[in-house]
Amino acid sequence: MSLGFERALTPIQPDIVFSIGNFGIANSTLMIIFIALLFLALGIFVVRKFTLIPGSFQSIIEMIYESIVGLVEQITGNRYHAERIFPVIATILVYFAVANVIAIIPGLTDITYNGIAIFRTPTSDFNTALGVSLASVIALNYISLQEYGFLGYLGNFFNFKEIIKGFKQGLMEGFVGFIKFFVGLLDIIGELAKIVSLSFRLFGNVYAGQVLAIIIIGSFAYVLPAVWTIMSGFTGILQGMVFASLVAVYYTLSLKPIEELSKKNN
């Protein structure tokens, strides 16, 4: 066993640090576990001690909470929808922000075990980006299913009603109904495209940032790499915000219009 510090170009495929039976544990997985333990410790030892009169750290947490709620409300255009989707969006945003920034800690991603880095930024592993994207799209479709009901949900993709309604009004309207029907079928491809778009956007930006950081660190002295590291941190937070904002937008598109909800409540 060897324990040391080294720097090499980050490979696209994560490295397997050790195996449990036939199941390999990658360094990106270990970083996810490490981040989860940090959040667990924060909840047990810090958040549980929050008081009615907030201290400095509690004030920062509450400010972050209000900022995320405000961001989601601006995207959804409705406070009810913002509070409903807040747990999902806040989890995605905070997790990705921490996951992208935690690699800034000096030496954390350079610790090796048997020549393999123990920790790797989770979002630089395409499996992480793809998994979160897939889970987000599945959750959004589940919410849409709850919102419209089973038949109404299928009607968003298989719009037979428009064909029947169109031919009742005339031949030309019937052909227009056929066009709307095929547009609905294209929405199925659109759902799959959301997964590809979210995952590749996040993975590409984070991985490219890491590669550029390693190249710059290896080519110049100390000042420029330090500036690039700080910029990478801000970029990581921004990428998490973009990902969470896109999920919020897709969430809004999965719901019935506010006007329909108002009529239903009245």
Image (spheres, rainbow, N blue to C red):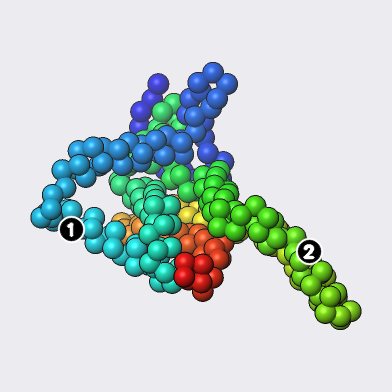
* Residue 73 percent across, percent down from the top left: 39, 68
User: Residue 153 appears in which quarter of the rendering?
Assistant: bottom right
Which label belongs to residue 160?
A: 2
Nearest to the observer: residue 210 or residue 123: 123
Left or right, 40 with respect to 145, comes to: left
Nearest to the observer: residue 109 or residue 31: 31
Query: Which residue sits at x=81%, y=75%?
Result: 166
Q: How many angstroms separate mark 2 from mark 1 (CA)?
A: 53 Å
* Residue 21 percent across, percent down from the top left: 54, 18
* Residue 167 percent across, percent down from the top left: 85, 74
In the current view of this chain or complex, which residue is farthest to the right? 171
Query: Which residue sits at x=30%, y=38%?
Result: 40
User: Residue 118 appears in which quarter of the rendering?
Assistant: top left
Nearest to the observer: residue 114 or residue 138: 138
* Residue 133 visible to an observer of this rendering: no
* Figure check: 40 above or below 229: above
* Figure check: 151 above or below 175: above
Q: Which mark lies nearer to you, 2 or 1?
A: 2
Q: What residue type is labelled 2?
A: Phe
In the current view of this chain or complex, which residue is farthest to the front? 266
Q: What residue type is labelled 1?
A: Ser
